[in-house]
Amino acid sequence: MSDLLERLRGRGWRMTSQRRVVAQVLDGEHVHLTADEVHALAARRLPEISRATVYNTLGELVSIGEVIEVSTEGRAKRYDPNAHHPHQHLVCSNCGTIRDVHPTGDPLSALPPEERFGFTLSTAEVTYRGLCPSCG
């Protein structure tokens, strides 16, 4: 479960009504919304919120490391509030649905030393693809 609102309060992020509503829309488990989806949901709560404010807020949240920008092939970027919880993504190849998954094991140790070419590994990004129940 995302704890985005708590993290933002803890770091003293200036919580205007617009920023708060964007954070509220993003906060939750398995939330991977596009900027347009964030805007539509935020506008239900705060009708005067502008698309530019949503885009600017999302950009700031990404730049401070509180939200992860998730890109999938040929689709709009999505925003993941689970920036501080290690996880991978499961993506439907048909509809683009994204789910957080927590496989066991360390993906860094899965790469054999001979395939590292002298690199010192710091992170690994693994994306699982397939068809969701609705598309399968």
Image (tube, rainbow, N blue to C red):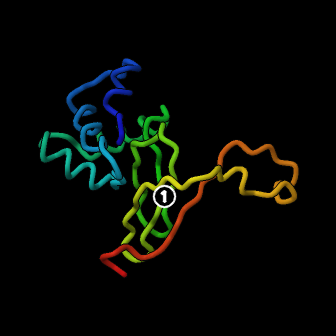
Kind of residue sitting beneath label 1: His
Which one is nearer the viewer's eye here, 47 or 87? 87
For the point 32% across and 21% down, which residue is it?
14
State left or right for residue 55 relative to residue 119: left
Q: How crowded is mark 1: few (under 14 residues within 10 Å), some or many (20 or more)?
A: some
State left or right for residue 120 relative to residue 65: right
**Disc 1: which residue:** 89
Q: Is mark 1 on a helix, strand or loop?
A: strand
Image quarter of residue 99: bottom left
Residue 85 screen position, x and y as percent: 48, 40
For the point 62% across and 52% down, which residue is it?
105
Outermost residue to the front: 104
Outermost residue to the bottom: 136
Counting the numbered discs, the total is 1
Image quarter of residue 121: top right
For the point 66% across and 45% down, which residue is it?
123
Asked if residue 52 shows in the view, the reply is no
Compared with 83, 73 (above or below) is below
Image quarter of residue 28: top left
Image quarter of the C terminus: bottom left
